Amino acid sequence: QVQLVESGGGLVQAGGSLRLSCAASRRIFGLKRLGWYRQASGSERDLVATITTSESTMYADSVKGRFTISRDNAKNTVYLQMDSLKPEDTAVYYCAADTFVGSNRYWGQGTQVTVSS
């Protein structure tokens, strides 16, 4: 079991920046993958970025060059730095953790990001 708590969402103007944080209830070093997903109103939940235990990262095309995912194993926290934000980035952002054993995925409760034009 992993509990995840996101923070850092809010309202920002287009072109601005936000940094999301996701604090885990256990050591993230032992987790297979950590990621950020987002769900806009009326849409499905989509992948934003992931990072593995070996620090390998992957990004959705829509955020490449603007968002950066990182992890701090000592703090059991994963971050999403979001720069050059656009109105279309408006969504609820969810943190997710994948385990090695059982291939389970755990989700946080989500944090709202709203980008005004």
Image (cartoon, grey):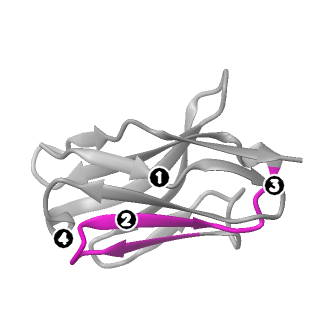
Does 74 sit left or right of 113 as displayed? Answer: left
* Residue denoted by label 2: 78
The answer to whether marks 4 and 3 mark residues whose Cβ atoms lie closer than 8 Å is: no
Of label 2 and label 4, which has the lower sequence position? Answer: 4
- Name the mark nearer the viewer: 4 or 3: 3
Q: Is residue 16 above or below residue 25?
A: below
**10 Å neighbourhood of mark 3: few (<14), some, or many (≥20)?**
some
Q: Which mark is residue 36?
A: 1
Q: Is residue 69 magenta?
A: yes
Of label 1 and label 3, which has the lower sequence position? Answer: 3
Q: Is residue 52 magenta?
A: no
Amino acid type, mark 1: Trp
Q: Is residue 110 above or below residue 10?
A: above
* Residue denoted by label 4: 29
Please identify the residue farthest to the right as the structure is shown. 117
Q: Residue at x 47, y 52 (%)?
A: 36
